[in-house]
Amino acid sequence: MRRAVQDTGWYLAEDGTLLGITLGFGYCAEHECGVRDLKAAFGVTAEPPIGLEDRRITRVPESFGFRRTQRKPKDKRRKPYEMALLSTDGWLLAHLHEPDCPSPVRFLSEPGDRWYKPAHDLAAAWSWGSFAIAARGKENIARLEELYQAFCNHDIVFGSVIAQFIRRQGLTFMIDSRIPQETRNQVREADLDHKRLIDTAKATGIEERLRAAGRGWFALHPLWTDASKQTVKFWLNPVEQHRYNAGYYTVEELDQWARDEGPVMRARERAQV
């Protein structure tokens, strides 16, 4: 798991009712490679999903749980505060009460710090196969426990992980029974469009050609080149970044990469070929 540093927060209705949470994201491979293993652990296996019914969890893993504890501030002059953790990491839940428990999810500041903000009372970390959400403060802890109960009732749907560099969001969990029908219809339409995108990208055969050439990547995500939605380009986050550039590339440019040519190659590498 890697800690999210952007956009962690609750989704609330106008009357304050809890709708869900976004765990946010950090600029790291763990937040770009999808969450297929995590979905499988919760019984979500449709790929690609069409509609919210394909995103609804059908089970929870044995390691999943919720726990409250008292945390001592770094400044020993301050009083301990209550916190809660919702996580798929059973070891972390079991050892949360230990003062020196190593944790991938940490609050960005503590009450009393000069740079403290109420938004820092919620923190999250996640990867392709696990997640942890920490909450501090009475209201946040109550919301986290409410989210836990929704998980236990299999009333949670996975949101999307969009890794397109500029337009991206973190891992999201929503309470299925509280999502209005209009939103459900919009999700289904977006899913059908996304399936057409995936099918169009697959038809290019570029992934197979790159693998045959021995290329590797942390992320290779398609997106439409323009509003006509006829051709695709790809966001590439390659391995061996001392040799290759990350960025948006056409199919032709990725084929050039397979031949050690083109803009994916760093200038020094092109000069050596």
Image (cartoon, grey):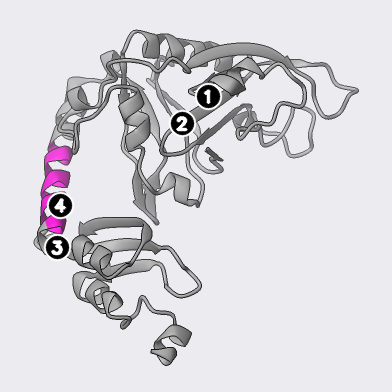
Q: Residue tagged by mark 2?
A: 130
At label 1, the amino acid type is Asp
Q: Which residue is mark 4?
A: 197
Q: On the rendered structure, is 101 left or right of 261? A: right
The residues bearing labels 4 and 3 have C-alpha atoms spaced at a distance of 13 Å
Q: Is residue 143 magenta?
A: no
| Residue 225 visible from this viewpoint | no
Which residue is identified by label 1? 89
Q: Position of residue 255 (x, y in %)?
A: 22, 74
Q: Amino acid at mark 4?
A: Leu
Work out whether mark 1 precedes mark 4 in sequence or the reverse, and give the earlier one. 1
Q: Residue at x 37, y 16 (%)?
A: 60
User: Mark 3 sits on what residue?
Assistant: 205
| Residue 266 appearing in the image | yes
Q: Are circles 3 and 1 on residues that touch, CB within 8 Å?
A: no
Q: Position of residue 116 (x, y in %)?
A: 72, 34
Secondary structure that dominates the magenta span: helix
Callout 3, which amino acid?
Gly
Q: Residue at x 50, y 51 (%)?
A: 28
**Mark 3 element type:** loop
Q: Which residues are magenta?
A: 189-202
